[in-house]
Amino acid sequence: MSTPRTEVPTARTRAWLVRIGRVLLVAVLSWLALRLIRGIDWDKVLSAITDLAWWQAVVLVLAGVLRLAVLSGVLFVLIETLRYPQALANESAGAAVSTIAPDPSDVVVRLAMFRSWRIETTSATSGLTLRILGFYVVRLAVPVLGFVLFWIAREYSSGFSWLALVGGTGALLLLGGLVLALRAAKSAAFVGSTLGKVVGGLRPAGGGPEIWSGRVVEFQSHSADRVRRHGATAALVLLLYVLVETGVLITCLSFAGVRIDPGIVLVLGCSFLVVYPMNGLPMMGLGVLDAAYIAFVTDYSDLDPTDLLGGMIVWRLTVQVLPVLLGLTTLAWWRRTTGASAESA
């Protein structure tokens, strides 16, 4: 009697299962988050959004553009020969595609744009990879900043401390792995050789182990050089970006009717910093981040959750909807000007 053969899921099947799991996780967490927000006056929330003055809308548009402009500085620093307007266009397009299409669609579009601008492939790939990894390190590390600032300026918070501990530990582990990878040339050669054997078996024209080993070593050495020369500057730009995004949120909250004074600004800013890693969830942690943020703010202030929720919705319109509109406009401009040359390359 023959033993039934067990089907092994393909990589594509596993990828789809992961995506479905992430969507279900966010859906469940969002549902739970909405249940946590009790007593919300939804008419008041709608009023906070629709009653924005025209000049406030202009300020929010400028704030959204400033946010992208600061983030674009990371690519500008990490990719040699890339001009700042190109970095801004690439960041805008990537933000739009990552919002409306599954990973890694934004990376494909970003690399196509780099090719159309004649940016060297190794430099572009290295800079984009370092930007992504660096953003994760900073995203995990900023809860420590929020915890320390709140502790110094006001009081010790056990809730802040736990998030700071988890985030800081994750940031250190990721940073340590990144540093180790950038220093290990022998490991890079081994990985490249292994990739060459795999690719050679699937597609002989893709090159042999020696070619792939050289490519990966070149990538590793190039990345190490960029980190050595510009890593600190890129990290400071990323930190500035997080602070700008915090300022954008506080501005949105004030426009929605939230009372603003120095003590409240401390609570609003530090609470956002400690929940910031949730920003890395799909749709920027929609629902989950919002509920956690409102819970922290209301624990340390007498602010109305309804006003806070209205401000969070205004913030999401500024940092999610506006970048999509800007990014799609940028993509249309790029395809009209240089996109055809990239697609034919």
Image (cartoon, rainbow, N blue to C red):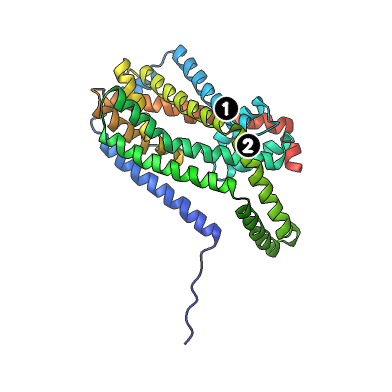
Distance from disc 1 to disc 2, alpha carbons, whole Å, reads 29 Å
The residue tagged 2 is 226
Residue 331 against residue 311 in the figure, above or below: below
Residue 220 against residue 190 in the figure, above or below: above
Q: Which labelled disc corresponds to residue 183?
A: none
The residue tagged 1 is 326
Residue 70 against residue 104 in the figure, above or below: above
How many C-alpha atoms fall within 10 Å of the one at disc 1: few (<14), some, or many (≥20)? some
- Quadrant of res 127: top right
Number of numbered markers: 2
State the image coordinates of residue 187 (x, y, percent, origin top left).
Answer: 60, 54
Residue 87 against residue 257 in the figure, above or below: below
Image position of 262 (left or right of 12) = left
Give the residue drawn at x 76%, y 59%. Answer: 205
Viewer can see residue 115: yes
Viewer can see residue 45: no
Give the residue drawn at x 56%, y 29%. Answer: 233
Under mark 2, the amino acid is Arg
Between 85 and 142, the one lying in front of the other is 142
Image position of 343 (left or right of 101) = right
- Quadrant of res 139: top left
Give the residue drawn at x 60%, y 42%. Answer: 107
How many C-alpha atoms fall within 10 Å of the one at disc 2: few (<14), some, or many (≥20)? some
- Element type at marker 2? helix
Nearer the observer, disc 1 or disc 2?
A: 2
Give the residue drawn at x 35%, y 37%. Answer: 164
State the image coordinates of residue 153 (x, y, percent, origin top left).
Answer: 30, 22
Under mark 1, the amino acid is Leu
User: Looking at the rendering, in which quadrant would you find the C terminus?
Assistant: top right
Between 254 and 76, the one lying in front of the other is 76
Farthest bottom residue in view: 1
